[in-house]
Amino acid sequence: MKVKFQVWWTVWLWGMAWPLGAQVAYPQGAVEVPVYPISRPAFSLPESLHYAFSWNGLRAAEGEINVSLDPENRSQVHFSAQSQTVGLARVLWKAQEGMETWSSRQTLKPANALIHSREPTLQFDRKIVFDYRAGTMTSWKLGQVEPRQKVLEFRNAFDPLSLLFVLRSLEWQPGMERRFEVVDGENRYLLVLQALAEEPVKVAAGTYPAVKLSPTLIPLPRRLQGETPRWFERLRVREAQRPQMIKTLEFWISQDPPHPLLRVRSEAWIGHVDMELTSQSEFSPGSGSPGEK
C-alpha cells in the first residue's frame, strides 16, 4: 500500500494524501477570506525543527523544517521543509519530498515556491509564482520540454508551508474559528481551523503548554467566479459519496514563543498516522523540556 509522507501536507494539516471530510458548512457562494494582521512573526531566525512520523506506532519517516533570511533579499525569509521515509517504510517505498517558499518578512505572504518530489513512480519539481496584484498563482512542472502552465485565481492565499508560520504567529484561544485560503501549486482550498482546547503536550523534544486545533479542508474552484451555490452543492454531494479516508485529524501548537508545531495526530482507515517534534534549535525550550534552566 502506498502512503505518501509529503512533509508540506503531513507536518501540520492533512496527514496523508487524502483530504479530511468537511466538518463545517460548505460555502453558499463567494468565499469570504479574512485578513489576520501579524504584529510580529513568531519564529527565530534561523530556526530548525525536526520531526518523526509513525504509522500505527512504527517509525516510518522523518522530516525537518528550517527558516532563515534570504541572503539575496533580506526583506524575505526562506522556509524549507523536507522529509523522507526511513526503516522498513523506506524499504517498501523509497520517498523523499521537499518544499521551499520565499515569503515577505513582514506579512509572510509567499512570492515564490518550489516543490520537490522523489518517489519510485513520481519524480518532479514544480515552480510556483504568486502575483498578489493580479490575484493569481501560476505554476509549472520543471524539466519538461514544454512545461504546462497552470493558473489559479485567489483572494488572500498562502501555500501550506508559509501558512504554517502564519498560524504560529497568531494568538489562539479555545472557541476561536479562523478561515484561510490555501493553494498548493495545483489546487485551491478553504481551510477552516477551530481551536478546541488548551492542554499540555509531551513530545520527544519536551513538554509544552499547547492549543489543540482541528482543521476542515474544502476544495475551491480555480476561478473566483466559479464560487456559486450550484458548485458547492455538487461538491457536497460528491464528497458525501466518497469513502472517508481520514476519520479524525488534530494538531497542537505550543503556546510558548516562538510557538512551534508540536504534534499532528490522525486516525485513518489504514490506522494511526502521527508526527511529533523531536528536537529544535535557535529557540528556548518549553516548560519541562530538556535543557530548561
Image: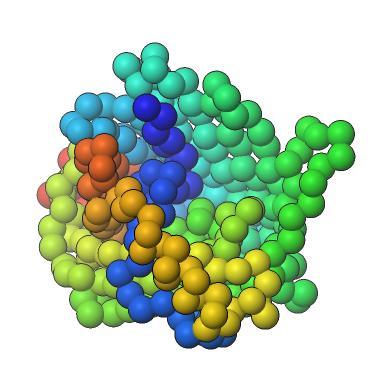
Quarter of the image for residue 216 reads bottom left
**245 or 51: nearer the eye?**
245
Q: Is residue 118 above or below residue 132?
A: above
- The residue sitting at 39% across, 14% down in the picture is 91
Q: Is residue 278 left or right of residue 147?
A: left
Q: Is residue 186 left or right of residue 264?
A: right
Q: What residue is rendered at 48% in x and 85% in y? A: 28
- Against 98, residue 264 (above or below) is below
* Identity of the residue drawn at 57% across and 63% down: 188
Rendered position, 191 above or below 28: above
| Total numbered labels | 0
Residue 2: percent from the left, percent from the top? 41, 29
Q: Residue furthest top?
A: 91
Quadrant (top left, top right, bottom left, bottom right) of the N terminus: top left
Indicate the position of residue 66 as horizontal and vertical percent values: 49, 44
Horizontally, residue 1 falls left or right of residue 185, namely left
Kindly give the residue lying farthest to the right in the view shown.
146
- Residue placed most toward the observer, 256 or 131: 131
Residue at image position (50%, 65%) is 219
Indicate whether 173 appears above or below 14: below
Q: How is the image coloured?
A: rainbow
Q: Evaluate whether residue 74 shows in this view.
A: no
> Residue 16, percent across and down?
39, 44
Measured as percent of width and height from the top left, residue 226 is found at 64, 76
Residue 52 can be seen in this image = yes
User: Can you tell which quarter of the image residue 270 is in?
Assistant: top left
Q: In this orientation, which residue lies closer to the viewer: 245 or 211?
A: 245
